[in-house]
Amino acid sequence: MLSLSDPTTTEDPPASEPPPSDEDFFSSASFASASTSSASPSASPPPNPPQIPLSYPADSTLTLSWVTHLMSTFEWASRNLPPSDFPSVLPVHVFDALVLSASKILHKEPNCVRIDDCGIDSSVVVVGDLHGQLHDVLFLLRDAGFPAENRFFVFNGDYVDRGAWGLETFLILLAWKVLMPHRVYLLRGNHESKYCTSVYGFEKEVLAKYGDRGKHAYRKCLGCFEGLPLTSVIAGKVYTAHGGLFRSIVSTPSKRAKGKKNRKIIVNPAVNSLSLGSLEELSKARRSVLDPPWEGMNLIPGDVLWSDPSMKPGLSPNTERGIGLLWGPDCTEEFLKKFNLKLIIRSHEGPDAREKRPGLGGMDEGYTIDHVVESGKLITLFSAPDYPQFQATQDRYKNKGAYIVLEFPNFDTPVFHCFEAITPRPKVNPFYDYEDVIDSDEELDLASMVTTS
Ligand SMILES: [Mn+2]
């Protein structure tokens, strides 16, 4: 073991059982079989320092063993090295190569990715908020089984912020994306933005980990965030997004415009009554913005990333958050019916947010079924157990995390897998002032938010 030069990282007490070898620990086979409901995982880190620094494959082609080695190396480093040693694990030129190659793939994807090539024996794993909780992410991947020819993954965003290993979490997901671009889909969460990462820790985390190259690395991450697609439709039946539904920005002709036959006019959506947007409108939205705007014409990305369901019928502005919408069960029904869907899986609300939402279920199990309507259901899925990592009060939520498995042939019958947090979590200092920042995802401080649109 290395001696520790930085008090921000402490070693864990030795595990009571000898940890498995690196190879056993990361073989996908040993984790793929069991469908553990309510598992109680405990930490069993690989014992030996892996080979560092990591290098990018000479032919620029990632392999399964490179990605699993990246995972084990980050896990080992999180328990044995201070954050400032990160470049000795992943030098900035290797970071650059990985982020560039993922970014190229992501920017080419449509706003709504369609997963249609899932045949016999295939399954789709859907994952909610992760928030930099590296050890829980690694558990989830092993428990569900790694991405494979017949195992798709859709991640609903919020990879970074609050937790201390947002960078590792995001890079591992990018590596899987590069390895299997048509099996792994990474959607954007509201935290994949300049505003959120400047308040909730990710920017400072990257600066701490990459030192004098930190600004460069942070900019590259932001560039990648801008490329993340917004939504997915799985097997034509399941719609997923971080926040959820979105408004229409196209209005039917007003009285004055009646002379011009069938001509749709675009009006300022803020001053019009709200109506639900279509998948066609979604496909045309401009998602490549550092912060989705809350005013102006380009409102669909902000709605998709920030909206919440409500038990009250109709669509209304999400005044609690200052951006996005609240939508009722009638809107869920309208959306499902109109697009012939059975299920909406969205994320975005953890136990802290749900505590403040009377009428909606708590997040103790990592998921809730919020709307049950004629055409199907709306589910909220949250995959960060024992969240948030840093909390001002002693009283923790002790929530489980969950992921959903959808299976052939229908893909519209969700199987829930709940799991507890990996313990012990390495002790590290937070990268944001968690006692000052309001505890849930909160209102946007609109004045401090700079949009580029
Ligand atoms: Mn969120």
Image: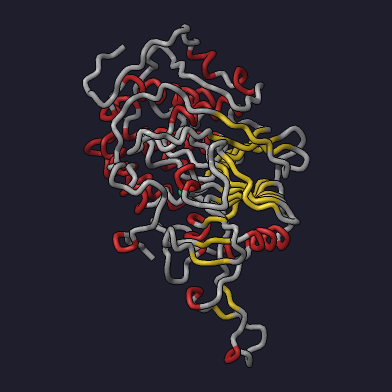
Q: Is residue 308 left or right of residue 160?
A: right
Image x and y of residue 116, in percent: 70, 46
Q: Is residue 425 above or below residue 21?
A: below
Looking at the figure, which quarter contains the C terminus? bottom left
- Specify whether residue 105 is in view: no
**Which residue is rendered at x = 62% and y = 80% of the image?**
252
Quadrant housing residue 202: top left
Tell me the quarter of the picture where residue 32 sits: top right
Q: Residue at x 38, y 36 (%)?
A: 163
In x, y percent, where is residue 418?
Answer: 59, 32
As drawn, is 200 to the left or to the right of 316? left
Using the rendered image of the protein, determine whether residue 128 is visible from the camera's viewpoint. Answer: yes
Q: Quadrant of the N terminus?
A: top left
Residue 450 found in image quarter: bottom left
Q: Residue at x 26, y 26 (%)?
A: 8
Query: Looking at the image, is 255 positioned above or below residue 347?
Result: below
Q: How is the image coloured?
A: secondary structure
User: Residue 82, position in %: x, y?
Assistant: 28, 25
